Image: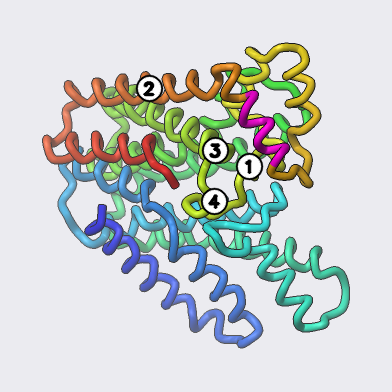
Amino acid sequence: MDALRTQVDRSLREFVERQVPALGDPDLEPLLSAANELLSGGKRLRPAFCYWGWRGAGGADMPEIFTAAASLELLQASALVHDDVMDKSDLRRGMPSAHRRFQTLHEKGGWYGSAEQFGEGAAILLGNLLLIWSGEMWRTSGLPYEALQAAQPVHDHMRTELMCGQYLDLLEQAHGENTFESALRVALFKSGKYSVEQPLRLGLVLAAGAAEQWIDDLCVAYGRRVGIAFQLRDDILGVFGDPAQTGKPAGDDLREGKRTMLIARTLAAASDDDARIVRRLLGDPHLDEQGVATLRGIIDDTGALQECEDLIGDYLGEALASLDDAPITPESRSALADLAVAATARKT
């Protein structure tokens, strides 16, 4: 992962540096600065799944695959910026979120109009810019034209799924009540598929040249299960994570009212009194530490936390077992096993 991260970081840095002439106007510098800061962090899991899909299907270790895989970090950054606007999140990776950053720029400049509206508008544009760059970086990666053409439908579908997942997430919050199955649907579309399954599929198809049946089987048996476990871990960290590690305030998902799989399990198992408390406190933007502690206690007492931990273990075990008979290189089989553990056992 360290070597891969170095290659991905280099590819991102070189790509963004090539955009500087187009952003030569000094008034555009805050956009470039915000993009650079956002791209400097992250676990680089999506490029890793793409890269090891490529290697697993026989692709060579070449600079062009790192560039193509790194383009997924631009897509991820775009999604994070827009997600923070929709959730009104103040922090991202321990730093002010993009819309708060631009809001502060407006306030310090003493400019006209609403600083909050300016911040949100600028962040939406930054997210759009990152989305455009992700497509450009993918197309200009230097991989053979035939490989990119073969994988383009996967690339297009992945981006469509992500946007649909964002809408389903908004819809889930608007509906209020949810089930584990409906929360799982959102998690798959919004995060699970584009974090694991589709990056893996991209790498495999780029190298193999076509979406053969074994690729679909592996992407579902391994990629989808790891994706679900990945999101379950994210749900847990959103409630119980250490702010020093997650970069966000404790219990932020509770203040935002996220209808996660963890919350769905909690409400399904809670007593009537506890369920009323959860419904009353969940989504309160002013929820204090005591409120967070109350909700954490109910989640733990209902067994929902342990149930989600058990599900992570089950999904991970099934995903790892699916690698045994997959027609991929031994090196990639080992790497994908390590990646699955890293994605689902992470603390940040």
Label 1–label 4 contact, CB within 8 A: no
Identified at 26% across, 60% down, the residue is 64
* Residue with the most extreme left position: 330
Query: Does residue 62 appear left or right of residue 235 in this picture?
Result: left
Q: Which residue is mark 3?
A: 240
Identified at 74% across, 33% down, the residue is 282
Q: Is residue 326 above or below residue 147?
A: above
Q: Position of residue 97 (x, y in %)?
A: 62, 61
Q: Which residue is mark 1?
A: 251
Main SS, magenta residues: helix
Mark 4: amino acid: Pro
Spatial distance from mark 4 to mark 2, Cα to Cα?
26 Å
**Secondary structure state at the residue bearing disc 2:** helix
Label 4–label 2 contact, CB within 8 A: no
Spatial distance from mark 2 to mark 3, Cα to Cα?
21 Å
Q: Which residue is mark 4?
A: 243
Q: Which residue is mark 2?
A: 315
Q: Position of residue 212 (x, y in %)?
A: 28, 28
Using the image as rendered, state which of residue 15 and residue 6 is in the foreground. 6
